[in-house]
Amino acid sequence: MKEMVNELIHYRELLYILTWRDIKIRYKQSVMGFMWAVFMPMLIVAAGIIMKLAFSFISGKPFNVMDLASISVKALPWSFFIGSIRFSTICLTANSNLVSKIYFPREIFPLAAILANLFDFVIASSALAVILAVGNIGISLNILWLPILLFLLVVLTAGIAFVLSCANLFFRDVKYIVEVVLTFAIFFTPVFYEASLFGKWSSLLLANPVGAILEQINNVVVLHQPPDLFWLSYAATFSFCLFIASWFVFHRSEFLFAERI
Amino acid sequence: MSETALELNNVWKKFIKGERYDSLRDLIPAVFRNTLSGNRSSELSGMEFWALKDISFQVRRGEALGIIGPNGSGKSTTLKILSGILRPTSGKITVNGRLSALIEVGAGFHQDLTGRENIFLNGSILGMKKEEIKRRMDEIIEFSGISEFIDTPVKRFSSGMYARLGFSIAAHVDPEILLVDEVLSVGDMWFQEKCLEKMLSFKNKNIAIIFVSHNLESVNVLCSKTALIKKGTLRTIGDTAETIREYICSNQEEAVDVATENSISNVKLLNMKNELVSICYPEQKCRLTFKIRCDKPFEECQLGFLIHRLSDGLSICDYNLPLNSIKRADSSGDTADGAIDFDINLLRGSYSVSLHMYHYPSATFLTRVKNIAYFSVEERVSWHGVTHISPLLHSIG
């Protein structure tokens, strides 16, 4: 374990450079430039608004700014999550010439994919922060929880990314399965709605660690409440255990990458 | 000084031939099929083969080891094992020092980034720090000789420019161990020469080099020790000239033509004392003896006598010698024994001899035997070139 971390620290510059490469290429190729970062979250928010409007028609409760704020606040981390998973699943196969020709810790690939998406997330978040400030959502000391929650989300994402990138190297159709799951995952995750809507079944939705983290983010940013400590520690335990386990899996199968790719 | 930089101890590497299941779609039905029929292991073992069998050697600092061998013999696999890309099935490797491997030039290049950006990318992939790259940027660009296009995306580069940039980066990594795998072949000859010089300077800087190449000339210039790998086994390791000769001669049997109606056979390269030779020296006289069978009148035929340099295929000479100077073995038969005497006015390198018989009236080749004999020339006077012109330095007056 210590060895794995040391090796990664030794190669950290390469991690930055590969992240920089991913970002640079994305923004170079796209005419929309930095709009790219906000495009995906905007779509998700738009879809969320439609759903919320539908809810309010049925329930008779009026649609308000708070709803819009909480959808946007959850849509951004969600878009970061699915973006990272999507990119990191194919990161090893997309870099096959590097995997089979040059040696360095392969963990760098999924991590760089996540960092590049984190960059997009930061851009989109700063745009959102402006909107929230204008929308008079307010702020409380609870916002200090936000970095911790985002860190948890990154750890969880990395944990999933390690396993999926590795799986996609050995079985090339994993990416299709991932694609399908990601398309529908938003319905199983409290992004457009609150888990509390489901009453006593809400813990089922929160058992999904992404859902638990998103709910806590909503708590601290929009609702100005401290996070639910039970679900927070659940998500933290889940994320770290998954991260360590999948890093080991990744590391143990690493030596097969070059011949199986 | 003579510290060991690299060591391989009884390294074996197993690969699996044929297709494998690389998607769940194929794997899941296959697992079901195999559990039902229950003969999984026997099917797999038939597909395995040894890519490397019991390879052991070591390289010291300041030493350059050449690796030669036919395609698919395991040269690149050896390098990949040394660089950590592949793990040996069994055996042990020891690497002491910062290792830089050039398995493929520009492997880390990204098509859409400019040359300069790719220097950053590839430099850090090869293990350089950002500061180091910044500091040596100008040096790298200058060495590559493509400063004019350095801010162009590399997808617009020619393959030669690609190779130039790739090698320039790798050459400035300051490794302690450098692995180079047949990467210079794309560059033009001036660049190849520049790279060779660079690698020679590495040798003086106490860097260990492993150089895999099909260009026997370059191997000869760079490496004092060379290993021959064939079908995964280490055939020879030792003096470069010796190893190259063995490599060349080992292909000889395969190159001999089957005897037809018209044939050239029993080709032997002798010195003037009628001893078989494979190493010659400039200004030596050699004799090539052969037996011909020809059903046409000898007066109507010519014997083609060609010499090529092996490293680059350069045609040294292409003579057409009238066959009528050869007497038939007996007046009725169509066979004859002949010999060509010639001077080895050649410089260091490996050469092959080809012969053919040409019939004038019908304008056809009666028989052609390519690379029927091989020899290498040894001398330590010249640096480069083909012809020995016996230069003599002296004072006048």
Image: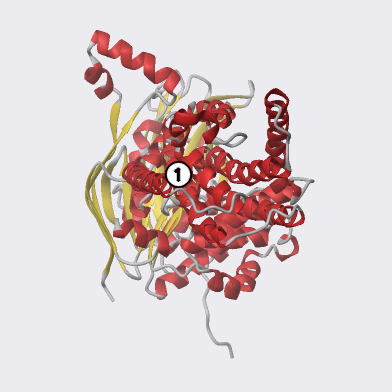
At 47% from the left and 62% from the top, the residue drawn is A12
**Horizontal side, residue B201 vs residue A81: left or right:** left
Amino acid type at image mark 1: Ser
**Horizontal side, residue A236 vs residue B161: left or right:** left
Residue furthest out toward the bottom: B397
User: Considering the image in quadrants, where does the C terminus of chain A appear?
Assistant: top left
Residue furthest out toward the front: A60
Q: Position of residue B171 (x, y in %)?
A: 51, 65
User: In this figure, which residue is indicated by the disc labeled 1?
Assistant: A100
Q: Residues within 10 Å of mark 1 (few under 14, many from 20)?
A: some
Is residue A261 visible from the viewing direction of this image? no
Q: How is the image coloured?
A: secondary structure
**Horizontal side, residue B92 vs residue B248: left or right:** left
Residue B178 figure quarter = bottom left
At 47% from the left and 32% from the top, the residue drawn is A202
Residue A106's place in the image compared with B64, above or below, is above
Q: Position of residue B229 (x, y in %)?
A: 32, 45
Callout 1: chain: A
- Secondary element type, mark 1: helix
User: Considering the image in quadrants, where does the N terminus of chain A appear?
Assistant: bottom left
Residue A64 figure quarter = top right
Q: Position of residue A9 (x, y in %)?
A: 41, 63
Is residue A23 visible from the viewing direction of this image? yes
Residue B125's place in the image compared with B128, above or below, is above
Frontmost residue, B301 versus B125: B125
Residue furthest out toward the top: B37
**Horizontal side, residue B216 vs residue A59: left or right:** left
Frontmost residue, B37 versus B144: B37
Frontmost residue, B180 versus B200: B180
Q: How many marks?
A: 1
Q: Position of residue B91 (x, y in %)?
A: 21, 48
Residue A75's place in the image compared with B358, above or below, is below
